[in-house]
Image: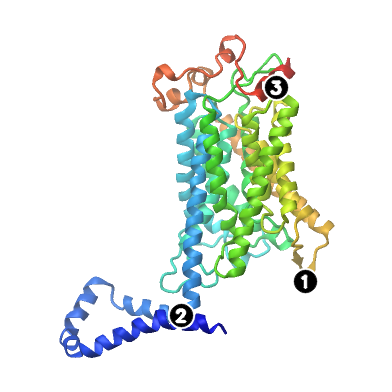
Amino acid sequence: MNWHRVLSVFLLLGLPALICATTVVAQEPAAAAGEAVDEAVAEAVAPEGQAAVEEAAAATLSATDEVTYTINTLIMFVCAVLVLFMQAGFAMLEVGLNAAKNTINILFKNVMDLSIGVLLFLFIGYGLMYPGSAFEGKWFGYSGSPMVTRDSESPNMDTTFSNSADFLFQVAFAATAATIVSGAVAGRMKFGAYLVYSAVITGLVYPISGMWKWGGGALAAMGFADFAGSVVVHAVGGFAGLAGALVLGPRLGRFKDGKSLPMPGHNIAFAALGVFILWVGWYGFNPGSQLTYFGASNAEATTYIALTTTIAAAIGAVAAMIVAWVMFGKPDVTMALNGALAGLVGITANCDQVTQVGALIIGGVAGMLVVAGVILLDKLKIDDPVGAFPVHGMCGVWGGLATGLLGTSLPEVGGETLTRIQYIGVQAMSTAIICAWAFGTMLAVFFALKALGMLRVSAADEVAGLDISEHGMHAYPPSMVTDSYPGAHTGAPAAPVTVAAKALEASAH
């Protein structure tokens, strides 16, 4: 027993109580005289018996439980805010890598991803994702409760953090999965269709696949590991984005006569700012997924997760820079920015169980993979304006597989620890199932919207820009809203501003 800690607790809790007791004894006559008044005030201020109930509930918790619950709840809340702040990062990244004439549309989509996501997750998604112990090992379940149950009267010591903090943290993840798609479909999708998509992915697609792992579902029972969501969040968003890009088709002028005509973004400064915001937000995403932070071992684990996350992001940016430099002759900042994000996505599934060398390998491979992915989409004539699929889809899959290859915590299934080969197999199969679910479901949604004539704006509206055609306003003064790639619509040569864009155009010729 740590007597210093016991003495500290006594001094902190006992002395104030002793002082209060002494004061009460000294003022007993006055207190007795005003007792009726105090009771009347208490009844007027709070519901009958509320104070007694709260006092009784508090009395059931030890001092350690009180501290544990408080620290875990507050840190989880801070982490939830960091993840929510990532919405700003996604918005700035997408705005920067697209034309100025679509800025309002992009910002609006990011606002609605979060807003619709909160409501749909509150009423439907949360119950689907966490249906309760009765559905452990299953593929589908629903808790039957459309709202968050408060635990103010009886603090939830099963999780050691408040139900409200848990919801805020989880809904931020749902919004992240949804907003990844925005970049892949930018510049040509109707706003109404996007709202439908956002509702489906946050209310149905993400919660169900999330239940398979984090809700104690079928994949969790098989031993699938995805600590913070390389597959459950990022691959889901990446493959949904790929489905959208395929059904929508490329932006007008993106590919002409079998040639690639890159369409550079209008503000690389915004894009860089977005990546830095996302990097910071990832410290809520990954370390926050530790879920309980009280105690020396949990505190160390939380900061170690931040360490591996930082290593992977850094090496991802460096690897992407080097590969692009070698391939295109000069270093390209947009490739380095996506390389940092690629490293972050790759490490998200395994940041808790890989060594620092493992983090270097995972981030480095992800950085190289994202460059290859951008080139591959260009060769296949798939238009993904921000590289959402290479970053989140491809690197999300890599994160899931890398967990099996390099993870140090082999899972136990049915009382037996999986072998390395079995672990890799479980990771590969589970990753494939989740990606197929997201891609297949959203492909059907996008095709349905297309069949109804709701999916893509007209050619004239696309040329004018979605800001004015969809929302009737510009983000900048009209004189400043010029097309970043006038050649795409006039027949004149396009004007790529990034090294990678110029090299891709040359290779297409």
What is the CA distance from the residue labelled 3 to the residue labelled 2?
66 Å
Can residue 67 be seen at all in this image of the molecule?
Answer: yes
Pointer 3 local density, CA inside 10 Å: few below 14, some 14–19, many at least 20: many
Q: Total of numbered circles in the picture?
A: 3
Q: Earlier in the sequence, mark 2 or mark 1?
A: 2
Measuring 22% from the left and 89% from the top, which residue is drawn there?
26
What is the CA distance from the residue labelled 1 to the residue labelled 3?
53 Å
Quarter of the image holding residue 44? Answer: bottom left
Quarter of the image holding residue 149? Answer: bottom left
The answer to whether residue 258 is left or right of residue 104 is right
Helix, strand, or loop for circle 2?
A: helix
- Pick the residue in front: 334 or 383: 334
Q: Position of residue 27 (x, y in %)?
A: 20, 87
Q: Which residue is mark 2?
A: 8
Depth check, mark 1 against mark 3: the one in front is 3
Q: Position of residue 282 (x, y in %)?
A: 57, 49
State the quadrant of the C terminus. Answer: top right
Q: Which residue is mark 1?
A: 415
Quarter of the image holding residue 417? Answer: bottom right
